[in-house]
Amino acid sequence: MLGPALDLVLSALEQIRDTSERTPCASRETLNRLFAVTETTPARTSADLLDPIRARVQVCTKCPHLVRSRTQTVFGVGNPDADLMFVGEAPGADEDRQGEPFVGRAGQLLTRIIQTMGFSRSDVYIANVLKCRPDMPSGSPGNRAPTPTEMRTCLPYLREQIEIIQPKVLVALGAVAVEGLLGTRGTMRELRGRWHSFNGTPLMITYHPAYLLRNQSPSEKRKVWEDMLQVLEHLGSNITEKQRTYFL
Ligand code: SF4
């Protein structure tokens, strides 16, 4: 019983933090009581901690225009204790239909990259900055990029996911995801292939797999693979000779 009650308290405090100028505060006595409760409650796993955030995202109405057009929210998928976390910009049509990030053609290529790194999709965590598909005029095919305002509105959810999962490395896929995470716009030529930081977590920036589908040149594919080799090195993975010489 205590777990859900604490979730409600935390959720209310987080809502005050996200939606008002006031920083939530509590007296020392109240905090001591809360700590006493949490000390007698069994430790909760990362999956337990992600559940209430997922529940808040499912009913989130902060962007009314996206609420009207979405089929469902797309929270994230994978290992809640992953060392490696991939972040894209937003769900597309396929993801909106299936409720899972990176399941379309670009997602299949990302899955291949993950497997070539020696992992499966369930070893890593995959999420987007935006949890709802950016709306399109009715009947229009394709997807649009999320706006900076939409990404700023949704970013607190991703921040909470990252705080719980605590990956050793984050990989941002494409310039729009970078803008959502860091709030800065740059060209991929300037950004990719070197280490950045998101709230203290090492962040590697590389091309979005959709870019590789549009641009099949071996040199662009090799760039992404070189970025992934840097990630593997940072994770302390054993890199085989075959992996070192691999072209996507
Ligand atoms: S995009 Fe994010 S902030 Fe906007 S409605 Fe969806 S879940 Fe809420």
Image (cartoon, grey):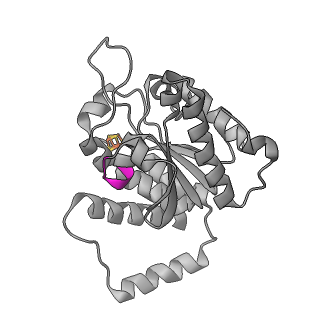
Quadrant where the C terminus sits is top right
Query: On screen, 146 above or below 108?
Result: below
Q: Is residue 118 visible?
A: no
Quadrant where the N terminus sits is bottom right
> Is 109 left, or right, of 195 in this rendering?
right
Residue 35 position in % (x across, y down): 49, 81
Quadrant position of residue 165: bottom right
The part of the chain drawn in magenta is 180-185
Query: On screen, 13 above or below 28?
Result: above
Judge whether residue 183 is colored magenta: yes
Residue 213 position in % (x across, y down): 53, 24
Residue lying farthest to the left in this orientation: 21
Q: Residue at x 39, y 66 (%)?
A: 9
In this figure, what is the number of numbered marks? 0
- Which of the four quarters of the rendered structure image does ligand 1 lie in? top left
> Is 105 left, or right, of 8 in this rendering?
right
Residue lying farthest to the front in this orientation: 219
Judge whether residue 224 is colored magenta: no
Residue 19 position in % (x across, y down): 24, 57
In depth, the one of 115 and 43 nearer the eye is: 115
Query: On screen, 159 above or below 10?
Result: above
Q: Residue at x 71, y 61 (%)?
A: 236
Residue 88 position in % (x across, y down): 46, 41
In depth, the one of 130 and 39 nearer the eye is: 130
In depth, the one of 101 and 168 nearer the eye is: 168
Q: Residue at x 67, y 53 (%)?
A: 232
Q: Is residue 29 visible?
A: yes
